Amino acid sequence: MSSIPINITEEHILRAAIDIDIDGIPAERESKKFDVKIDGRRYPPKYLISLANKYANIDELDSLSFSGGAQANSFLSKLGFEVIPKMDVNLRFPYESHSWRIISPSVFIKKMDKSCFFHRGTGIPADIKEFFGAEDMKSGDRMIVSLLHQDVAYDAFFTADNQAVPRVRLFWHSSFTVLLEKELSEWFSFFKENDSAEEPPLLRIQLIETSRYKVEIINPKTIELDVEVEIDNEPVYEGAVKYCYSKVYERRPENRKKAIEIHGLQCTVCCFDFESNYGARGAGFIEIHHSKPLFVTGEEMVVNPETDLVPVCSNCHRMIHRSRDVVLTIEELRILYKDKG
């Protein structure tokens, strides 16, 4: 499978959309599960890219030379286009399938089980194969990919077995298993005796470009410990009701875990990564900022981890809250950071 030409730009995609507006979509080029939304209209991702290639490289791109699903969706998302599930498919994000949670067309959460630790891989349910570009794999097919963790690439591959209806599995090199054993040693011991766990560690897998996936390891035990340490170290203030960004919602382990699943472990403002800078000591750590100001009234509120909770490094978090009277938004802090950079 070839790659999508990197010289296809946003302008080429928009010109292809105009062609579709004029000429329509051939029946055989209709999309199955995803559309690209442009100015309120929907377009099939793979056909859009094929047509766009005419404006970048003269000829329409052969549909057999690249895959739909993950490859096409990731390419278009990076150009700034919105990829959405088709309305006639029962697919809404996050989408749950067995031990997988699909956060978006390019972010996938795997609940780890015994096979991840002792069989160097995991199965891909049939209903989510397209997210990985594996929907057309046949028995015996193999698709080589790279898993990137902390800038180290680990060899891996998708393969389809010889069942009547081929099952797709993802296998990785033993060096990635060594990494898992190092970072999740207590879970290795657990899964020697157990097949699954109620709250297992997670792999956050993000498609960053064709055949390359960024992998982050989320350990629920680490999240709980980070919450406990933060509470122990919190300074005590005297006085009446305070106007603040409520810590109680940032500290709940379930909220932190969901926020990290969706947004990852890098600082949203400056991209600082604790593990990259501090090694094992920083693995799995990030602070979570509640983006909505709240009065501390003791009343419960509904928190949306996708829109309300944001991962930030300690420096950026402190700058957001440095003035009690002027709490910065994420975008305001980004502007300050970029201006100084």
Image (spheres, rainbow, N blue to C red):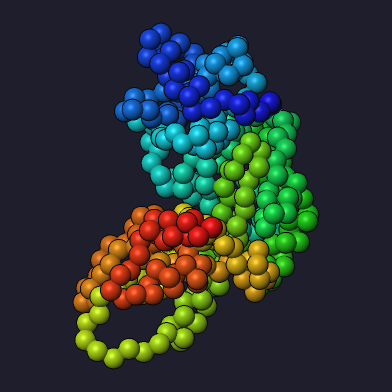
95 in relation to 247, above or below = above
Left or right, residue 152 beside residue 58: right
Residue in view at x 48 percent, y 24 percent: 11
Work out whether residue 78 or residue 135 is closer to the camera in this orientation and state it.
78
**Residue 257 visible in this rendered orientation of the protein:** no
182 in relation to 33, above or below = below
Relative image position of residue 304 (x, y in whole percent): 34, 58
* Residue farthest toward the right in the current orientation of the protein: 174
Q: How many marks on residues?
A: 0
Q: Quadrant of residue 129?
A: top right
**Residue 338 visible in this rendered orientation of the protein:** yes
Relative image position of residue 85 (x, y in whole percent): 41, 34
Work out whether residue 115 or residue 95 is closer to the camera in this orientation and state it.
95
Relative image position of residue 240 (x, y in whole percent): 21, 86
Residue in view at x 57 percent, y 25 percent: 8
Q: Give the quarter of the figure containing the N terminus.
A: top right
Relative image position of residue 283 (x, y in whole percent): 62, 68
Residue in view at x 33 percent, y 68 percent: 327
137 in relation to 214, above or below = above
Residue in view at x 62 percent, y 29 percent: 6
Q: Give the quarter of the figure containing the C terminus.
A: bottom right
Work out whether residue 293 or residue 341 is closer to the camera in this orientation and state it.
341
Left or right, residue 268 beside residue 117: left
Left or right, residue 25 beside residue 222: left
* Residue farthest toward the front in the current orientation of the protein: 340
Q: Quadrant of residue 274?
A: bottom right
